[in-house]
Structure formats: structure tokens, C-alpha cells
Image: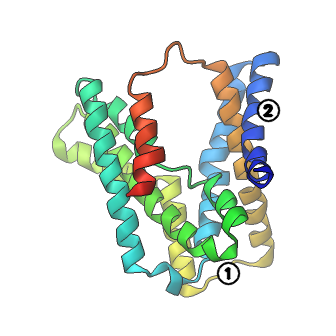
Amino acid sequence: MSDLFGLAFPFFGLIFLGYACGRFVRLPEEGLAWLSFFIIYVALPALFYRIVSQTPFAQLINPGFILAVVVSTSFCALLALILALWLRRGNIGEAAIATTVGAYANVGYMGPGLTLAALGQDAATPAALIFACDSLFFFTLVPLLMGVHGRSESVLHTLAGVVKRVVTHPFNVATLLGIVSAAFEFRAPGAVERMLDFLKNAAAPCALFTLGVTVALRPLGRVPRELAPLLALKLLVHPLV
């Protein structure tokens, strides 16, 4: 029990620290804008790239494992989407967000750290594969659904906009670059790699702290009725599948 607490505390401690600061320190919410930009467009892409690029390409090519990840994630995402569309009366935009709640595991800044700490270095390749597959899947699916939801132009124009969002999404770009780097065994110059490591190491603390601050500054007025079944889908059904 103490080992589990020791593994989880640094991650959840940062969230609670951010929450406490958001509750008791009076600073304007606008200050989060640049930090959020840094997390989404700089730090997390560096983290994604490093995780994937440092995995041997031969280990990334595991069709059976990839198929299992894609099928299980797609199945849970479909269930979450159907549930959200039903409860939200066909609102695709809200259903897209609910789909991530129900099927997207925290494989970014918490998943790899907890997995490697609990299971050791042998878990690095499976963690990287799950990370790459889930990232590409969800950061393609969500922009697609949001594009359909906000469609006011022709189908072709909307489709072009969705494709642009998917192709230019920083998480997708970083993941694909990581795969290419692993395939060609590319290593950046030492100074660049050190900078990427700085950014990678900054991603989780900044993201978790910002999450805590955001929860404090934007409290839920009520708990959405779909939250409980979506969490059950994520925490119970997805691992079983």
C-alpha cells in the first residue's frame, strides 16, 4: 500500500497543489493562457516525441498488440460516443469530449511514469505503443467530430478543415515524428536532446499543476449525469477489454 501511495502521490500531489493555489491565491485566470500554450504546443509534444523516438522501431512494429489496443480503444470510444449522444440528445460537440472521458486513458503525462515505476523498464515498449496508438486515434477522432459539429460550409470544405486540424495537431505531429525518428534511428545533436529532455520533464508538472488550478477556478456547478457511466467505462470496461 505504501508503495502504491509513493507512486501516485507525486502526480496527484501536483494536482492538489495546483488546486490549492487556485483556491487561495488571487491571480487572474488569464495567466493560464501562456502556460496552457506551452503545455499543449511545446512541452507535451516534446514528451510525446521522446517517448516514441526512444523506443526501438522493431519493438514498435507489433501488429497483434497494436490491433488489440486499437480494437479495445475503438470499442470503448464507440460505447462512450453512443452513450453521450443519447444523454446529450445528439450534440456531437459535447459527445466528442465525453468520448475522451470514457475511453482515453491518461497515457500522456501520468501513464508512462506510473507504468515504468510500477512494472519496470520492460513495460516501456507496451506503454509507448499504447501511447502512440491512443494519441493518434483520439487526436484524429475528436477534431473530426468537432469539425462535423461545427459544420456550416460544404462537406468538402469541412473535410479539408478537419484534415488540416488532424495533420497539424501538435500531438499527432510529435508522435509521427517520433515514429519516423525511431525508424531511421535518428538522434538529434546533444544540445537539442538536452533541451527536449528539459521540455519533456516540464510537461507533467506543468500540466498537472494547471489541471489543479483549472479545477479550482472553474468548479462544476453540478456533476453531469453521464460522468459516472463514462468513468465506469474507462476504469472497468476498458481494462477488461
Residue 237 on image: x %, y %: 39, 49
Q: Say which of 191 and 71 sits in front.
A: 71
Asked if one can make out residue 147 in the rendered structure from this viewpoint, the answer is no
In the image: residue 46, left or right of residue 229: right
- Identify which residue is drawn at 46% across, 37% down: 231
**What residue do we see at 75% from left, 78% from top?**
189
* Residue found at the very far front of the displayed protein: 1
Q: Is mark 2 in CB contact (under 8 Å) with mark 1?
A: no
Image quadrant where residue 85 sits: top left
Q: Which residue is mark 2?
A: 17
Q: How is the image coloured?
A: rainbow
Q: Is residue 25 above or below residue 198?
A: above
Left/right of residue 133 with respect to residue 7 in the rendered view? left
- Tell me if residue 155 can be seen: yes
Question: Percent x, y for residue 131?
Answer: 52, 62
Label 2: state its secondary structure. helix
Q: Amino acid at mark 2?
A: Leu
At mark 1, the secondary structure is: loop
Q: Residue at x 69, y 31 (%)?
A: 212
Q: Amino acid at mark 1?
A: Arg
Q: How far across and down, in percent of the image, does residue 239 sit? A: 45, 55
133 up-or-down from 64: above or below:
above
User: Does residue 115 lie above or below 215 as drawn?
Assistant: below
Q: Residue at x 48, y 45 (%)?
A: 235
Cα separation, mark 2 vs mark 1, equals: 36 Å
Q: Which mark is residue 202?
A: none
**Residue 125 occupies quadrant:** bottom right
Q: Which one is in front in this view, the residue at disc 2 or the one at disc 1?
A: 2
Name the disc covering residue 187, or none.
Answer: 1
Q: Is residue 28 above or below residue 47?
A: above
